[in-house]
Image (cartoon, helix red, strand yellow):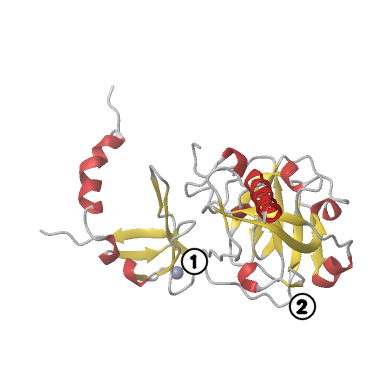
Amino acid sequence: MGIVSRGFRGRRREQDDRLPPGQYLVDDFPVLSAGPTPRVPLDRWEFAIDTEAEVTHRWSWPELMALAQTTPTVDLHCVTKWSKLDTSWQGVSLDTLFEDVETAAEYALVYSYGGYTTNLPLEDLLDGKAWIVHRYDGEELEPRHGGPARLLVPHLYLWKSAKWVRGIRLLDEDWPGFWETAGYHNYGDPWREQRYQGD
Amino acid sequence: MTTEHLDGNALAGPLAEIFSVDVTAATGRCASCGLSGPVASLRVYGPAPGFVARCPGCDEVVLRLVRGPDAAWLDLRGAVSLRVALPE
Ligand SMILES: [Zn+2]
C-alpha cells in the first residue's frame, strides 16, 4: 500500500510540474467552437504557405500524406484553463513543409477553412515546435477537433493550434488574428499565463 | 485654435444610454451580406473563449464579446449598425 500511494503521489507531482499556472487537468477533450464546423472534402483540401514575396507553396492531401510523418506526444493547454497531458498525434513537421520556402518574414498568420485566423512569430512554428496533424490517438482527426488537419503548436495556448488549417501567410508585420483582435493575448504563453491583452 | 472633433468622453452619456438597454432587441445589419434583424436572431457560439455571434444569412461574424476577469472586449466590426429603439 505504501508503494502504491508513493507512486501515486510521484505521478501527481510530475503532473503538477507539467501544469502551467492557473490550469487544471482533464481526461476528456473539450470542444470549443467559434462557428459552424467546416466539412472539407479531401479531394478539395489543400494547404498553402504564402510568402511575403507572394510566392505560394501548395500541398494537396495526397502530397501531405507522402511527406515524412512524425508522431508527436504533447501536453495541451487551453486558455479556458483545462490542460490535457500526453496527447498523441500524427502529422508533418512544419520544418518539413518549410524546407523549400524562402522567406525573411518574422510573422505568420495562420488561416483556416471557415475563416478563423491566428498569428504568431514564424520562429514559433519552426525547429520542431509545430506540426500539421491529421491523426489523433490513432484515429483520423474528427472534424470537431479540427479534421481533416489542424495546426499543433503546443507550447502556446491551444487557440493558436488552428483547427481546419488551410494555410500560413508570412508577413513582415504582425497581423493579429481572430481572438488576438478580441481581447486575447497576442502571444499566449501558458507558462507566463498570457491569457488576455495586458497579461 | 478650434478643433473639429470632440474628446471621446463626449460619448459617455450617449453610450451609457444605449448600453443600458437590452441590446438583443436592437436591430443589427450584417456588414457582409446586408441582412437586418434583431441581435437575438444571430447564431451565437460560446461562451468560451468568447461569444461569437454570426449572421443567420451568411454565417459571417457580426459581433464578438470576450469577458476577461477585469475587462470585456466588444467587437462590432461585422455590423454596419445597430438600431436601438429608445423612448421619445
Ligand atoms: Zn450576413
Q: Say which residue appears at 27% left-offset and 35% top-offset.
A: B9
In the figure, residue A28 lies in which quadrant? bottom right
Check contact, mark 1 vs mark 2: CB within 8 A. no
* The CB of the residue at mark 1 lies under 8 Å from ligand 1: yes
Residue B67 vs residue A149: left or right? left
Question: According to the image, label 2 marks what residue?
Answer: A43
x and y percent of residue A157 in the render? 61, 50
Q: Say which residue appears at 49% left-offset and 36% top-offset.
A: A198
Task: Please rate how many residues cluster around mark 1, counting C-alpha atoms within 10 Å: few if below 14, some from 14 to 19, many from 20.
Answer: many
Q: Is residue B38 visible?
A: no
For residue A115, above or below residue B75: below
Name the chain letter of the residue that bears numbered label 2: A
Question: According to the image, label 1 marks what residue?
Answer: B60
Q: Say which residue appears at 81% left-offset and 45% top-offset.
A: A127
Q: Is residue A111 visible?
A: yes
x and y percent of residue A68 in the render? 89, 61
For residue A73, the mark is none
Question: CA gap, disc 1 to disc 2?
Answer: 25 Å
Q: Say which residue appears at 77% left-offset and 78% top-offset.
A: A43
Type of amino acid under label 2: Asp
Type of amino acid under label 1: Glu
**How many circles with numbers are drawn on the protein?**
2
Residue A157 vs residue B27: left or right? right
Q: SS at mark 2? A: loop
